Image (cartoon, helix red, strand yellow):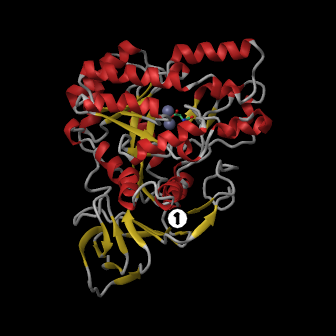
Amino acid sequence: MADILIRGGTVVTADSMGPTDVLIRDGKIAQKGTGLETDGSIFDATGQWVMPGGIDTHTHLDHPIGRLGVRTADDFHVGTIAGACGGVTTIIDFSLQDRGESLLKARDRRLGEIEPNSIIDYSFHTIVTDVNPNSIKEVESLVESGFPSFKVYMTYGDKKVGDGDLLLLLEELAAKGGLAYLHCENDCAVTHLIERHISRGETGPSFHASSRPVLVEAEATNRAIMLAEIAGAPICIAHVTSKLVAGHLEEARGRGQPVVGETCPQYLVLNDAVYDPEGGFEVAKFVCSPPIRDIDQVEALWSTVEDGLLQQVSSDHAPFHYEDQKTTGRDNFTRIPNGLPGIETRLPLMFTYGVKAGRISPSRFVELTSTNPARIFGMYPNKGSLKVGADADIVIVDPNKEVELSARCLHSAVDYTPYQGLRVSGFPTMTFSRGEVIVQDGEVIAKRGRGHLVRRQKIDPKSLP
Ligand code: URP
Ligand code: ZN
Ligand code: ZN
């Protein structure tokens, strides 16, 4: 492969920002400096920012919701195209253990779904739904084969893992170099609040939010942190929606506990006005768990992103069509599939509402969306950095180019976007994956299945950001 030189741009990494040329050789970063030359191809990045490709560690592509008999609307081909168009060069998705199933079998089944389809590099977390002696035994093989993270739902029907089983799993992860990635909501409280709404005939989509108040999230997060401390295990709390929840992380980190937290753009850009019953059934477009919070909590959540209390921003991309999928719950909000699309809009939304709004620096943007995700989940510095020798996963962004968001201009198969009409900047003009241009000016030029599996390192609790 001929060398590639990205010339004249401003390189932004988690540590620094400044004018730098980047030379790519054999898919890796070969040299950085000013005034570099090459006989190969040259891309002029004058006036643009050159950054490590985005890493989205929370996507649900081709994800089954057994209870409702639906799968998310994007398969691994469409979903990774949408990601690449939004500047994402690596995803970590999920393999879901069916009850009684071997975790290794679930992994291999998932590999068969992703390998022929993904246009970007990938890995996945193992969702453990059934903690039994065999799943505990398989933790080590998964960690050793490059899959060191394990997702646990503390609620969600038959996917839920109870406290005793969670503790057993955490102990095994602590012993074998794994990390737990936790969806924290108090299952008893959610179940009770749902039943109360339904018994009163309160079945519309707005009641989804009031059945999952912030206290159910805060309680479960605190419990997860305490169980992790008992087990001595590192954990990452998924989709933190409020400062109250982030406060539990702050206390634990203050005690030296290896705990990190994630939030997602929907909790920073939207607010609970989306659940106004005046919106009718269209409110279902915003049904996700945990739900979107009120404006005061949104503002407070921004402060946790600004001051370093939370370490990463992922999308939790879980797209369901409004027609035919969200509408399954027309008569009962508990039957609305939970989740929002967001893989393609994550970087532009954080760029616009974070960097351009003056809330976070360009380097903090890179840290939250690429470098920290790589560090937390065992891929740094090969991913999430522009260090010499790292994979040349790069996005080039024109910071002044604005786009109006609409479902039509986005690449997900889903029939709506929660961000319709918002004007954003931060879409890449070019996305490189291991030195190959895969998106240029919105045109996708990548072969289906070109993505590689990223085998990740064991988690060293001391190296967590
Ligand atoms: O509502 C959401 N977030 N759906 C996706 C599944 C999950 O909770 O991670
Ligand atoms: Zn979740
Ligand atoms: Zn999720």
Please, is residue 159 above or below residue 455 in the view? above
List x then y, in percent, for residue 53. Answer: 39, 60
Q: What residue type is labelled 1?
A: Phe
Taking 116 as reference, is 206 left or right? right
Kindly identify the residue that appears in the image at 49 percent across and 25 percent down: 217
- Residue 173 visible in the shown view: yes
List x then y, in percent, for residue 422. Answer: 65, 57
Q: What crowding class fits label 1: few (fewer than 14 Cα within 10 Å), some (14-19), or many (20 or more)?
A: many
Please, is residue 442 above or below residue 316 in the view? below
Q: Quadrant of ligand 1?
A: top right
Taking 330 as reference, is 101 left or right? left
Kindly identify the residue that appears in the image at 32 percent across and 19 percent down: 227
Taking 273 as reference, is 217 left or right? left
List x then y, in percent, for residue 403. Answer: 61, 66
Kindly identify the residue that appears in the image at 44 percent across and 74 percent down: 48
- Residue 63 visible in the shown view: no
Please, is residue 151 above or below residue 364 in the view? above
Figure label count: 1
Which residue in the protein does label 1 denote?
427
For label 1, the SS is loop
Kindly identify the residue that appears in the image at 34 percent across and 24 percent down: 225
List x then y, in percent, for residue 143. Answer: 27, 35
Q: Quadrant of the N terminus?
A: bottom left
Which sits in the foreground, 281 or 382? 281
Q: Quadrant of the C terminus?
A: top left
> Quick check: is the Cβ at mark 1 less than 8 Å away from ligand 3?
no
